[in-house]
Image (cartoon, grey):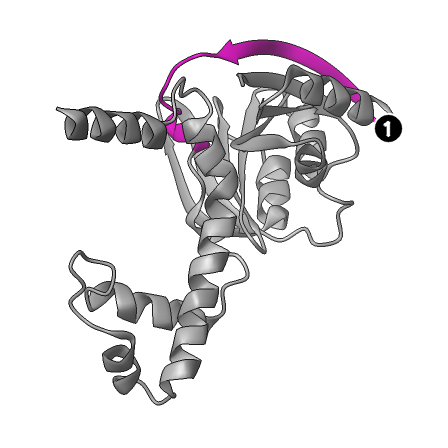
């Protein structure tokens, strides 16, 4: 199984894209979070009053500075009323989105990774049905290590895990439950809480299951370029050593 990385740019009705179209020297980088976006906005020249006003309307300004290289601002915003996220459509075609999204000169730039070149072709066909799109590059990834840009954001790893499940997981981790040999038992862990052993174990197992499920797609990326099954190789070596 191979890995493919594609870089695309699209145009559709999006406030960030429209701002970048009106101000050609402006670059917006967007990192989506679970309920908001963090935006890094840069421009080579001092913004006009009109641009300042538009930036302030985007969301809450977290950082602002200006130096010889230009103007730099970081904002946090929520655009819950926008259409279904294009990132959801990436996932429908088994393509993994790599943040940030970059808005420049009226275009939105995205990078995705797929396990099959056909998935990328299907994604492009889907997106062309309702927006202007260009494929900028498509390359095969042969390296055995995954770039840091493809690491999962922490918020995504803990999706759908409740506060009680997280607390159970944290207690087990900090108490040495996952060390070899274990430094504690489920009963000892439950005794440190206000719930029964069976209830604590249920919280812990659900947290473990959801955490592994959330990391599944990234686990596939890490192992996709492996040419041998380490477990099978290890078993064969064990057999050879036993025979000796």
Residue 185, percent across and down?
24, 74
Q: Locate the N terminus by quadrant.
A: top right
Q: Is residue 143 magenta?
A: yes
**Left or right relative to 196: residue 116:** right
**Left or right relative to 114: residue 156:** left
Q: Residue at x 20, y 24 (%)?
A: 240
**Left or right relative to 149: residue 25:** right
Q: Locate the C terminus by quadrant.
A: top left
Residue 232, percent across and down?
35, 29
When the figure is inspected, residue 62 is found, relative to residue 163, above or below; the finding is: above
Identify residue for label 1: 130
Kind of element beneath mark 1: loop
Question: Which picture quadrant has residue 153?
Answer: top left
Part of the protein shown in magenta: 131-150
| Front position in the image: 104 or 67 | 104
Q: Residue at x 52, y 50 (%)?
A: 76
Q: Residue at x 47, y 29 (%)?
A: 221
Query: Around disc 1, counting alpha carbons within 10 Å, would you say few (fewer than 14), some (14 to 19), or many (20 or more)?
Result: few
When the figure is inspected, residue 218 is found, relative to residue 236, above or below; the finding is: below
């Amino acid at each position: 199984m191979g890995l493919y990385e594609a870089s695309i740019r699209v145009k559709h009705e999006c406030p960030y894209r429209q701002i970048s179209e009106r101000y050609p020297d402006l670059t917006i980088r967007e990192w989506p979070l679970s309920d908001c976006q963090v935006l890094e906005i840069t421009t080579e020249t001092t913004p006009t009053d009109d641009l300042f006003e538009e930036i302030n309307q985007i969301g809450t300004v977290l950082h602002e500075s200006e130096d010889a290289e230009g103007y730099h601002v970081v904002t946090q915003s929520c655009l819950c009323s926008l259409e279904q996220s294009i990132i959801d459509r990436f996932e429908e075609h088994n393509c993994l989105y790599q943040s940030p999204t970059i808005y420049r000169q009226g275009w939105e730039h995205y990078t995705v990774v797929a396990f099959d070149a056909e998935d990328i072709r299907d994604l492009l066909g889907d997106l062309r049905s309702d927006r202007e799109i260009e494929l900028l590059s498509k390359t095969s990834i042969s390296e055995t290590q995954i770039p840091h840009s493809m690491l999962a954001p922490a918020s995504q790893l803990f999706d759908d895990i409740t506060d009680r499940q997280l607390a159970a997981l944290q207690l087990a981790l900090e108490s040495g439950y996952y060390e070899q040999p274990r430094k504690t038992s489920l009963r000892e862990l439950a005794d440190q809480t206000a719930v029964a052993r069976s209830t604590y174990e249920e919280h812990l197992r659900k947290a473990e299951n959801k955490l592994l499920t959330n990391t599944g797609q990234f686990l596939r990326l890490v192992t996709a370029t492996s040419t041998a099954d380490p477990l099978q190789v290890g078993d064969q070596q064990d057999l050879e050593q036993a025979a000796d």
